[in-house]
Image: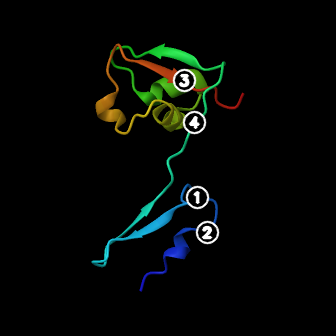
Amino acid sequence: MIDINQYLTGASPYNNAYALNYGDGDYSLETPVVSVPSSSNDIQHTIKDGETLQNIAYKYYGDSGKWYLIAEANGILNPFKEVESGTLIRIPAYGS
């Protein structure tokens, strides 16, 4: 038997995760949807041709690894398909 709790301890994005048991022996580990609050310091950005969430995050945060903040703030589930030139997105004020 798999001890699901072993995956829920320590500093991890899965700290608040929960296991779904599908009844046929399959499990999945799900995390609650993260809400990125809006503020008056948020920036509006129109995506230009060739831009990715990673290079937009680098432009505004100095860290391309923070791309997920932009994705979550804009409800982007698949940044490889949903980021199109001309789309207006919200850049959340991170750390301010």
Q: Residues within 10 Å of mark 4 (few under 14, many from 20)?
A: some
Dot 2 amino acid type: Thr
Could you classify mark 2 by the number of other residues whose Cα lies within 10 Å: few (under 14), some (14-19), or many (20 or more)? few
Taking 60 as reference, is 6 above or below it? below
Q: Residues within 10 Å of mark 3 (few under 14, many from 20)?
A: many
Q: How is the image coloured?
A: rainbow
Separation (CA) of disc 3 from disc 1: 24 Å
Q: Looking at the image, which residue is at 57% across and 32% down? A: 63
Instruction: Tell me, for residue 36, which label it has, or none.
Output: 4
Residue 78 x %, y %: 34, 38
Q: In the image, residue 20 lies at what x, y percent?
A: 40, 68
Q: Which residue is mark 3?
A: 91
Q: Report which residue position mark 1 lands on.
A: 12
Residue 56 placement (x, y as % from top left): 48, 23
Which marked residue is nearer to the observer: mark 4 or mark 3? 4
In the figure, residue 52 lies in which quadrant? top left
Q: In 3D space, how far apart are the residues under numbered discs 4 and 1 (Cα atoms)?
A: 18 Å
* Disc on res. 9: 2
Nearest to N terminus: mark 3 or mark 2: 2
Among the two numbered marks 4 and 1 on one chain, the one whose residue lies closer to the N terminus: 1
Q: Is residue 9 above or below residue 12?
A: below
Q: Amino acid at mark 3?
A: Ile
The reply to whether the C-beta atoms of the residues labelled 3 and 2 are less than 8 Å apart is no
How many numbered badges does the structure rendering display? 4
Q: Quadrant of residue 62?
A: top right
In the foreground, 84 or 64: 84
